[in-house]
Image (cartoon, coloured by chain):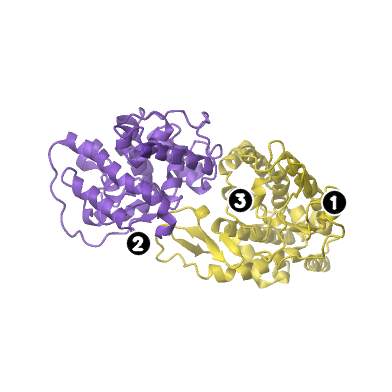
Chain colours: A purple, B yellow
Amino acid sequence: MNRGVWVTLGTALGVAGIGGALLYSRRASAAGLPYPAPAPDPGPTPIIELAPLPKASEVAGDLLRNWGDTPSDLRALLMTMEEVSRIEGSSRVFAVIAYRESRFVTAAHNGNAAAEQDERDSSRRAYDNNKGRNPPLKYGEQAANFGSGGLFGALAPYFLWTGVPEVGKKAPLLNAPPELLFQPRAAAFGAAVYMQRLLAHYRVDDLADIKVGWANPGLLGSGRGSATYHDVRARFLADAMTLGIDLTDAATIPPKLDASAWPGVPAVFAGLVGALPKELA
Amino acid sequence: MTDLFCYGPDIEALADLAGDFDLRSPVDTRTWYRQAWETLAEALGFPQQLAAELDRRRGAREWVTTTHEAGMAAFMMRMRQTRPAVTDPQASTQLTVIEQMTSVSRARGELWRVTVDPTTLESGACYEEKDGGLSRAFYPDTTPGYFGEGWPGPPPRAESRCGWETPLVLHFGTFPWVYSSRLDAGGPGLRWISPSLAPALEGFHVVASLLQPEANLQQDARQVVGIYRHFAAQTAPLIARVPGPQGRTVGQLFQRDGLLHVHQGSLHVAGLEGPRGYLPASAFNYIVQRFASFFAVRRATLRALAWAPEMKRLVANTSDPCLRGQVEEVARAG
């Protein structure tokens, strides 16, 4: 992806790298024992084909009201995220996040251009700082060099460690290559888990706080009230307006999202991704 | 022989994109119309509403009319959820102008593209702004574009109160992409909605009616052929740059069977840059499908001339020479 296009995203994603590290460092300190180092040279990365984007007929939720300019062919995916994660009202919030992080381009990539060294630095830092405390990634080095991307702008190492705090070594993406981020169903899985963790483990006062946590969970703690905290909130609210999603429409988005009905990582993975090829499972 | 060859072999191939069906077969007809409407609803963002409306009518017997009614009801629900994009005065003028233009053009058999000298209309195709000034109710779409080479004149016979210097031209056959040179991803016609009025419904009614045999036969297909060939010629160099499905990667735009697709991504954020402006992938597909569906219905109705007397009555006074030829041939065959 050309840096010129993503210059506004880069700032947010650069912050996301630091934030992601904080999120994972919390999990790592709770885990206790270190995991072994990853195996070297896993060979060429396999091409993975997941199921196509969900169709409107596959969701029960409304795809018309209060979606603004969200692409109509992505709404069913966003609604599937809400329905599978049981976080009521989250689909439109995911839409606002995706607007900021990728402009709805599923193959958005920060880190593939020469000028995107900061993104690669972020993913390298994320990997190096956490690889000793998390299960090994089969494609760890590739993830470290990948940067961030996908519909929700995740840093590759954190994306591949999705679910580790909940299911440890059974986390489903440990053997997957970072390019899996571009598959919208996989990106959706990572985003749903991340949203749940923010809601369950951090002080999230309102919808804008979710985006703050997306950028950097640390801003929901000691960073709350800082200039960056307010900047991220303002940008999120402006993005919602630009996109045409009314965050005060209580019929589609409750004032606070609630993850208490979360069905667990395996159920969310099954509902969004299905199954990975057996060599990656 | 009752087919589309009179219009040219490219038109026969175009119709094949939308599939073939036989109006004598209820199953065939039901399947085709359902799929045609589902394609249309997917593109314009109301598939759930269409499914619900079709489900309510699942016991119906006459499927051409039933799908039309269901589709119109579903589109109305879609527009009810759409944010107003124009003021009531602008929508009011739009509504009146569309009604006047389509009424006159329907009689001429030229509903696909309608043109009028705006100064001959009572409103002048103008509306009053909040500050009291007058503005044009539509975009003056007269530069060379994807549907034609532009319509620079003749200039309006009278002086326009709101600055019209060219005819008013609207392409209802591809509604909501009504302008030749302004193909944005959303379709400008979908923004014809105000707090109290929805001129978009009138525009949609025209494009939907062309799927019905009666309105389809009333349309002079020569107009459609001309616009299609211009569109095809303008877009061919752009589409030629798009790879086929082999070896496609995630998020990549590719072409298959005459339409554009994005592998594991949104068609609505993809498009092609061309000398006549940006061509959104979703608009390209929708426009091709409208042309294809029009000729698929035309083909089915031409075949029906041989066995359906009401079809012959419908085309008795047609200005379309191809259609006239088909009727005469059927009459000769007895």
**Residue A129 in the figure: left or right of residue A10:** left
Would you say the residues marked 1 and 2 are in contact, meaning their CB atoms lie under 8 Å apart? no
Q: Residue at x 40, y 36 (%)?
A: A230
Q: Is residue B214 visible?
A: yes
At label 2, which amino acid type do we have? Answer: Ala
Counting from the top left corner in percent of width and height, residue B273 is at 54, 64
The image shows residue B33, relative to residue B84, as above or below, that is: below
Please, what secondary structure does the residue beneath circle 1 have?
Answer: loop
Q: Is residue A52 visible?
A: no
Residue that carries the numbered disc 3 in the rendered image: B40
Please, what secondary structure does the residue beneath circle 2 have?
Answer: loop
The image shows residue B292, relative to residue A254, as above or below, that is: below
**Residue B137 in the figure: left or right of residue A95:** right
Of residue A239 and residue B96, the one placed in the foreground of this image is A239
Q: What chain does mark 2 sit on?
A: A
Residue that carries the numbered disc 2 in the rendered image: A113
**Classed neighbour count for the residue bearing mark 2: other residues with Cα under 10 Å, few (<14), some (14–19), many (≥20):** some
- Label 3, label 1: how many angstroms apart (C-alpha)? 32 Å
Counting from the top left corner in percent of width and height, residue A109 is at 37, 55
Say which mark, if any, is on residue B6. none
Q: Residue at x 63, y 65 (%)?
A: B14
The image shows residue A271, relative to residue B150, as above or below, that is: above
**Classed neighbour count for the residue bearing mark 3: other residues with Cα under 10 Å, few (<14), some (14–19), many (≥20):** some
